[in-house]
Image: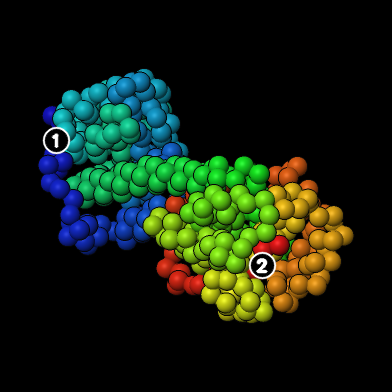
Amino acid sequence: MNTTVDFLNTAVSPSECVRLANAANDAAWDALERFLQQLRGGRHARDQYSEALAAIREATGASFVFLYSKHIDGVLEVDGTIKAPTTWYREFSRTVAACLGEGGVWQPEEPTRVGTISGVGSVESAVFLPVEAPRPAYLIAVGLGEDRRLQASDFRAMRVIWRLQLAHEQHLHLYDKLRETLFGIVRCLSAAIEAKDPLTSGHSERVARIATRLGKEMKLARGEISDLYLAGLLHDVGKIGIRDDVLLKPGPLSPSEAAHMREHPALGERIIESVSRLAYLCPAIRGHHERIDGRGYPDGLAGEAIPLMARILAVADSCDAMMSDRRYRSALPREKIEAIFWDGAGSAWDARVVEAFFTCRNELYEVCSRGLGQSVYMAVERAAGGDQSHAGRPAFRVPTGAKV
């Protein structure tokens, strides 16, 4: 006669986790700690199945742990050095499921045919837990030796670990949805800018790529480069709020029209600050027309008061503006662009960023013909939460260089 114990109807609460810690041996709790660290590592859910099984085997001392799919009637994952025949997994899973129903510990008083693995030995105990992965499946830990018979605390440890896995999987699913939403927002906003002024089509993408290349030249961290890319894509989003008669005017702007045009950095800030996951880019968007000498706008910031990301965007924005045809002039020759940057280093633009421009200028001149910089998807992944290095970052007011 088989002894079975049903624990599934008891909810796992924080206090129960504490009781589990007290009841289990140090190895079990260490296994749970390591598994939590792996989850915080942000790996994909597919990888977590094998890691969850490994954590369960370590926590329980089971000989091996496997995940058996009712849908395909076969094994999805096995952790352990012992490998049983495919037919054994099927027979054993069905037998234990019939005995335990909704879950518990299986402790046969005498070995049975189905509980014996040819060439290995007899199953002394097993822990059975029905799960969704994502279809109905059986999670089973198997103990082959009498030295460590699986018991109630092992069932609870297994359930806690698997629920942590499921919570992590749900988190990843929500994260993917958030990332897709942010990806759509960034692309829609970028397209809206270009729709306002088709002549400058591609300007935001080029500024993003130039800024990225400058950031790499200045040896910024990968996360900062991703921020630069997104800020470059969105730096002119405020032009959505500029009147067409001003934005599309082919000749010089009147003083009142110029004042209206200079509103676009602040308008861009107001648009982006409403998107919480992108709000940390607002200072760069607001300040991309500030100058080192304090004669920029909208805030008249100067020198080191202008955050670095804004100073890089200033050079990138001016670089593409000079390399492109505009309604009021043709693209400037390279010699003229370089002369303007030399003259403006330390006054219009940060001299260190200008130095980076000259170091990689040949690549920047070709930015329209080959893909430099990072993809929108990678940058959005960081903004969505895949990279938390900017989490908790204090708000800063970004300002940067002049428009040519």
Residue 375, can we see it?
Answer: no
The label on residue 115 is none
Q: Residue at x 19, y 47 (%)?
A: 152
Residue 198, can we see it?
Answer: yes
Residue at the disc numbered 2: 402
Q: Amino acid at mark 2?
A: Ala
- Residue 70: where, in percent of width, then height? 29, 24
Q: Is residue 293 left or right of residue 60?
A: right
Q: Give the mark nearest the N terminus, 2 or 1.
A: 1
Question: Camera-side residue: 303 or 359?
Answer: 303
> In what quadrant of the picture does the N terminus appear?
top left
Q: Secondary structure at mark 1?
A: strand
Q: Residues within 10 Å of mark 1 (few under 14, many from 20)?
A: few
Residue at the disc numbered 1: 3
Q: Residue at x 76, y 53 (%)?
A: 329
Tell me the quarter of the picture where residue 217 sits. Answer: bottom right
Q: Is residue 216 left or right of residue 101?
A: right
Q: Residues within 10 Å of mark 2 (few under 14, many from 20)?
A: many
2 or 1: mark nearer the eye: 2
Q: Secondary structure at mark 2?
A: loop
Question: Camera-side residue: 9 or 303?
Answer: 303
Question: Camera-side residue: 345 or 280?
Answer: 345
Q: Is residue 79 left or right of residue 116?
A: right
Q: Amino acid at mark 1?
A: Thr
Q: Residue at x 76, y 63 (%)?
A: 357
> Rounded to the nearest whole Å, what is the CA distance between mark 2 and mark 1?
79 Å
> In what quadrant of the picture does the C terminus appear?
bottom right
Question: Camera-side residue: 115 or 287?
Answer: 287
- Residue 53: where, in percent of width, then height? 37, 42
